[in-house]
Image (cartoon, rainbow, N blue to C red):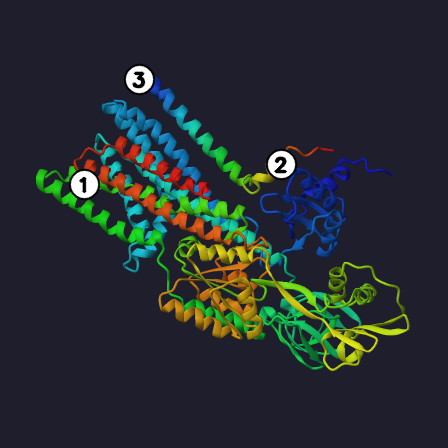
Amino acid sequence: MSASCPACVSAPAAMETAQAVVPNVFLSVPSIHCAVCIGKVERALNSMSGVSAARVNLSLHRVSAVSNRPMEDLVQVLGGLGYPAFPFDAGSLENSTDKTGKDLLLRLGVAGFAMMNVMLLSVAVWSGAEGATRDLFHLISAAIALPVVTYSGQPFFRKAWSALRFGQLNMDVPISLAILLAAGMSLYETLNSGHHAYFDAALSLTFFLLIGRYLEHQTRAKARSAAKDLTALEDHSAKRVRGTKVETVPVSQLRVGDQLLIPTGARVPVDGRLKDADAITNRSLLTGESDPISHDRNAFLSAGEVNLGHPIKIEAQAVGCDTSLRQMASMVETAENAKNTYTSLADKASAAYAPLVHILSGFAFLGWYITTGDLRQAINVAIAVLIITCPCALGLAVPAVSTAAIGRLFKMGFLIKSGTALERLAAVDTVIFDKTGTLSVPGRLEGLDGLTQENQCIVKALADASDHPLSLAISSALPVEGVTLTDLNETPGQGISAKYKGQNVGLGRADWLGGNSRDLTVKIGQALYPLSPTEIIRDGAASCVTEMANAGLRTEILSGDRKTKASAFADQIGVDAYAAELNPSEKFDVVHKRSVDGEAICMVGDGLNDTAALTAAHASIAPGTALEAARSAADVILIRDSFEDIPKLFQIACKSVQLSRQNFTIATIYNLIAIPIALAGFATPLIAALAMSTSSITVLLNAMRVWRTA
Amino acid sequence: MNVLVILIPVSLILGTAGLLGFLWTLRSQQYEDPHGNAARILLEED
């Protein structure tokens, strides 16, 4: 009988609402870019059984959903639609709401509303309200301003206190003093029927400075979020073999002794011993050596090597912190501790500004007290000097410029992760590149071009018939038609053999084909033709090096590869100097020693062997294809493949330092005009409000000029 | 000046209403995805 009682009808709907709607699956989907994409993705995911509440975040290029299906199913569905999706490691993605940003925005909003309301009342007073009316308006302003200052000013008070506790001064100390004293003095004046109350000045200060803080925070959060997307592109799972079953588990759950399956093209997740007869891996991310390395049974494979050959099995020997990968990461930590702390422009400015302002204010107080004997007037003038020295222009000077610059660089494909990166990039005089994977990328297989036309066709046919991962590269490198072969016979891991016009032909390991080495070889009849992988210059790298030389920057290469290869490459690309066969700690030593000698070095690298050097350099850049450790260590990540825009990065960095200095000059000029006015006792709240607003707006507008460079 | 007795409370109430409206936008997470919210108006509802 169909449900007809009201409870039975409403129960399912009630249960649905009661069920958790907190998303538990997050995917990064970089190719979503418009409304149609949103519609397609959400419809496709929501129509899957077990998946609900799928929602796209277009600003962050992410999808979240409530799902009880494994993540692979969702990835598959989206991949089928044409949107490659990459799961976020549950640990790496913090709660998707950005707490600090929201907190700042809330305080900013409250300060803004309060400022506007108090300004309403202040204008009434400035227009000539007298006596009891003026006192009433002041009282209402006090009632609004005091709680708001206590709430919205906390970011500054906290930072100021944390500096004062150690006897230091930072920019937040004069700001906090100005806000608190303005509020306090105004309260005193209000209660004593004074003429001037500076509540709107205190709130305007808070508001403008919070804008600066919020801008700083947002640009940094955006870069961090984008950096997380890059991390999501990597696979944090491993395939563990238990008996006959292969299960996919997160890398963090692996234990010593686990049998792991490494598919072709995948990275070895933990140190292990090779269980198969042989393997070919690429170690360039660990050592910089560009040639593939062959291994025998029981050979030791490090975490981070890429499997180039057929799928292999390893037995885990060291997991987690014990892997050689992690040990190199700890070398990075040591490098970080050895690094000198960098004083940013903003810190330098506040170091000059803070004591000066307090001294001036003190003199104002003493001067007025001595000449007039009026304590109240003396205090008023001293506080007016504090307020009018416009800490908001100084507080906005650097964040405004760096927000504009970082936004522009983001559009060009640069992720700036560090707040002081721009200043440090502007100071660089030498750029040091890693070779393998940074300036050079894998190219064609050498030896193919030397073959005759007929032989090339034979190789093409062999490659097309083979399942070996390199065979695809071989096949696509040969623009010829394959011939018909007979007696095709493939031995996995060794090669493929066939007959052509009665001759034996083969493609595979040389020793399997009758030769001596393990290199990839082609056999036609009795002749053996070795094929060796080559490197080519990355797109845009050559023009990058030339433009840097024109700009007066010195360029060098530090490589872990063999001398012959490094030397040839250095000549080809045109750098000023090179060094080869360096291990990771030697790279670090070179950069560190020269930095101590006074050079400002920018390191560009992608592998694990570069991470310590990246940390030791004055500034550092990593391409998007770099290892995660290198990307975390670098100040700037280049998302695009081409290096062509890197000189522009330096140009914009120099321009933003220039604009920051201009902003400081603007702020100083305002102060030079305003301080005499304040000292003379003419700094009414109206003048203070005007000075603050105009200086802040001028500084913000000047910062926008970074969009007009080059 | 009697009009102030009306006007001041009115302006305060309006100001508070504005602030509450802002708090509501924060709470309903309207700042999470500005591009997405703009794009969604172009979606065709089934």
Q: Find disc 3 in the rendering and name its residue.
A: B1
Image quadrant occupied by the N terminus of chain A: top right
Crowding near pointer 3: few (<14 within 10 Å), some, many (20+)?
few
Q: Percent x, y for residue A334?
A: 45, 71
Residues marked 3 and 1 touching at CB (< 8 Å): no
Q: Percent x, y for residue A230?
A: 59, 56
Quadrant assignment, res A371: top left
Q: Percent x, y for residue B34?
A: 56, 39
**Count of marks placed on residues:** 3
Type of amino acid under label 1: Ile
Residue A94 visible: no
Q: Nearer the viewer, mark 1 or mark 2?
A: 2
Q: Find disc 1 in the rendering and name its residue.
A: A379
Disc 1 is attached to a residue of which chain? Answer: A
Q: What is the C-alpha distance between the residues marked 3 and 2?
A: 50 Å
Disc 2 is attached to a residue of which chain? Answer: B
Crowding near pointer 1: few (<14 within 10 Å), some, many (20+)?
many
Q: Percent x, y for residue A615?
A: 46, 65
Give the vertical position of A654 relative to A602 (above or below): above
Residue at the spot x=32%, y=32% of the render?
Answer: A141
Residue at the spot x=44%, y=27% of the render?
Answer: B14
Disc 3 is attached to a residue of which chain? Answer: B
Quadrant assignment, res A523: bottom right
Horizontal arrangement in the rendering, residue A100 relative to residue A87 (left or right): left
SS for tag 1? Answer: helix
Q: Nearer the viewer, residue A559 or A343?
A: A559
Q: Find disc 2 in the rendering and name its residue.
A: B39
